[in-house]
Image (tube, rainbow, N blue to C red):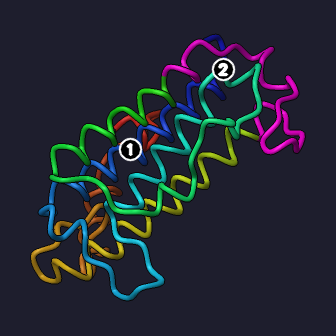
Amino acid sequence: MDNQLLTGVIKQFQYYKTAGDKILAQLSFEDMNFSPNDESNNISTIVKHMVGNMMSRWTNFLYEDGEKVWRQREQEFESSYTDKDEVLAAWEKGWAYVFNAISPLHESDLNKIIYIRNEEHTAAEAIFRQLGHYAYHIGQMAYIGKFLKADQWISLSIAKGKSVSYNKNKFNQDKGEHPFTDQV
C-alpha cells in the first residue's frame, strides 16, 4: 500500500470493527438474539449478514463481481449461530476478508472498474460503499445494545452528558497530527 487514502480507509474500517467489537463484548448471546419485532434483525443476524456480504464483496475484489453466485443472501437473515463464540468467530472471519483484500491495494487500483450485481463502480466507490454499509449496520447494533443495556451500556464515544468534560480535556491538550483513528 502506497497511499494515504488507502491508509485512511483501512483505519476507518478498523474504527468500525473496533466499535463492533466493543458492542459485542458488552452483550450476552441472548442479548445478541433480541429482536424488537418480527421485521427487525437481531445483532446475531446483522453479524451473519455482514459476514456474508464481506465474504462476497472482498473475495477476488478487483477481478470478480462482488455479488458471488455462491452467496446465499436470504439465508443470512435466518438465525443459525448457537453461541456467542460462534458469532465472534464469524465476525472475525468477515473482517479478515475485508483487511486481506484492502491491505495489498495500491493507488493505481482505486480507479479500476469493478462490478457489484453487474453495476459498474470504481474500486474506490466500491470501498466507500462497503464502508457506509458496515457503519450503518454497526449503528443498528449499537442502538440495540444500548437499548438492552440501558444504564449498564458503556458508550462507544462520548457518553451522554459528558460532552463538556470531554471537550475540556481535548482542548487542554496540544494540537497534534494524530487522526482520531490512531486511537483504534
Quarter of the image for residue 5 reads: top right
- In the rendered image, residue 121 lying in the magenta stretch gets the answer yes
Q: Position of residue 126 (x, y in %)?
A: 73, 40
Q: Position of residue 166 (x, y in %)?
A: 27, 65
Q: Residue at x 45, y 44 (%)?
A: 51
> Does 6 appear above or below 162?
above
Mark with earlier residue (1, 2):
1
Q: Quadrant of the C terminus?
A: top left
- The numbered dot on residue 17 is 1
**Residue type for callout 2:** Asn
Q: Residue 157 at what x, y percent from top left?
A: 32, 62
Q: Which residues are magenta?
A: 100-125
| Residue 53 vertical position relative to residue 132 in the rendered view, above or below | above
Q: Quadrant of the N terminus?
A: top right
Residue with the most extreme bottom position? 37
Q: Is residue 115 left or right of residue 87?
A: right
Locate residue 182: give its quadrant: top left
- Closer to the eye: label 1 or 2: 2
The front one of 41 and 78 is 78
Q: Residue at x 64, y 11 (%)?
A: 2
* In this rendering, position of residue 127 left or right of residue 121: left
Q: What amino acid type should be assigned to the residue bearing mark 1?
A: Lys
Q: Where does residue 174 sit, x and y in percent of width and height?
A: 35, 43
Query: Which labelled disc corresponds to residue 60?
Result: 2
The residue under the point 38% across, 88% down is 37
